[in-house]
Amino acid sequence: MPELQLFEPIWLTLKLAFVSTLILMIIGIPLGWWLSQRRGWLIDTLNTLIALPLVLPPTVIGFYLLLVMSPESPLGRWLDSTFGLILPFSFTGLVIGSVFYSLPFVIQPIRNAFAALGPEPMETAATLRAAPLDAFLTVALPLARPGVLTGAVLGFAHTLGEFGVVLLIGGNIPGETRVVAIAIYDQVETLEWANAHWLSGTMLLLSFALLMLMQRLQRSHQGVV
Amino acid sequence: MLRALLLLTAFLPLQAFSAELRLAVASNFLITAEKLAYAFEQKTGHEVIISSGSTGKLYTQIRAGAPFDLFLAADAERPERLVNEGYALPESRVTYALGQLAIWSRKANFNLEPEALLQQPPKRLALANAATAPYGRAAEQAISYLGLTDLPSTQVRGENISQTYQLVYAGAAEVGFIAYSLYTARPSGTIWQIPTEAYDPIEQQMVVLKRSTNLELAYQWHEWMLSEGRTIIAAEGYALEAPNA
């Protein structure tokens, strides 16, 4: 049987993935829409910035986030003196790190789904005198639903697997920043391989289930079109 | 009802006085630190929260404001730097353990003495990266001290000492230079302790951090570790400096 303390990192990881995905959806849907509707240098630059975590080692993102959020940096000092907030080594800091890190995985499917709609559905809605927001919520968003769901699942799954960013900005604090990936590393370092197996097996099953779910979502999408 | 109230008041003082102590511990000392923490918790009723990582990473995190009370490093360099840079209290810097180097093989009854190794060299020999791990540097010193420089074995490098242990455990190397404490945690195979004059002492130092929110408790741990804690540290395969040295 796994030790009871092993459940803490699993619970924490799920909480982190859930909160991060929620924030990613709030940012991702409007941003994805905006990016799908425009062209130009600014959009290209933004797309490139958002895509960076795909190619950068997560430790690079973690290292810069640590420097920017540290109470020694101008931003960190301001946050500390104004709100008494120290972001590194806190759950909030991890959420911010995860949002950056998982952003491309959420934005890209959402943006592509909106772009694939083409202008017709919204134009049709407009000729029927739907207000833009109304048209977006009742026409564009439901049509792009498979893309949005794929983004949510990918964002959730990717946050679950996060290691490099958390390693640098998390500080491995039990119950606060010790997520499963870090806990596994700890257990291996201390030669507690049975515990490492329990945690790794849980992650494996969870990731498998999530990717399976995504495939099913994509198939149902193809069925509609 | 009255009984419940009495019970409640009995627990109140304990609640008010029990506090949390946050330790940043170098990975190689984690197993020992967990045992120390358990003994300290039993004795004082305070809670010890351990965060572990490599010494270099913990050092960077402390500089970035990590909320730790004490830092148990795997070397002397990083605690000294933290003192010089104003993150740690100078008078708290002390060597709490000396790492012991050993040669280990998973095979039972394997002759690991230098002469035997020269006669029957292992195909692959594991040691830690000398640039990042104190045990790696010590292993290189021991190799030349023991006259093993001409050993034809291919060297396999672990990033740190537990990875080096895993290289031997997984069979990637037949023989490896590991920390004696890792063997103590899980005795198996054959071990040969390298004489301490073969390498510079692997001093592991600790410091109390300025950011600590509970200096009194931090120093209580500090003192306890250097007195009662010594028995546990020694039992886990570390050597100790003479008290007050």
Image (cartoon, coloured by chain):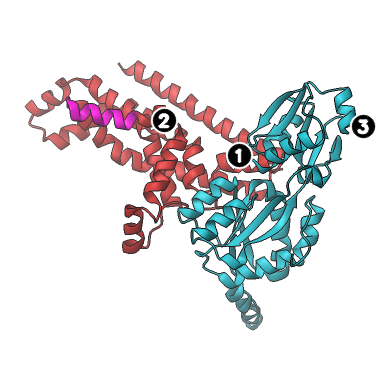
Relative placement, left or right, of A68 versus A46 is right
Q: Is residue A225 left or right of residue B183?
A: left
Residue A51 is labelled as: none
Point out residue A65 in the picture as x, y percentages from the top left corner. Answer: 40, 44
* Amino acid type at mark 2: Leu
Same chain for labels 3 and 1? Say yes or no: yes
Say whether disc 3 or disc 1 marks the residue closer to the N-terminus.
3
Residue appearing at x 38%, y 59% in the figure: A85
Q: Quadrant of residue B216?
A: bottom right
Callout 3: helix, strand or loop? loop
> Residue A212: x and y, percent?
49, 24
Q: Which residue is mark 2?
A: A56
Q: Label 3: which residue? A: B109
Q: Nearer the viewer, residue B112 or A93?
A: B112
Q: Nearer the viewer, mark 2 or mark 1?
A: 1
Magenta residues, start to end: A40-51
Query: Amino acid under label 3?
Result: Asn
Can the viewer see residue A21 in this picture? no
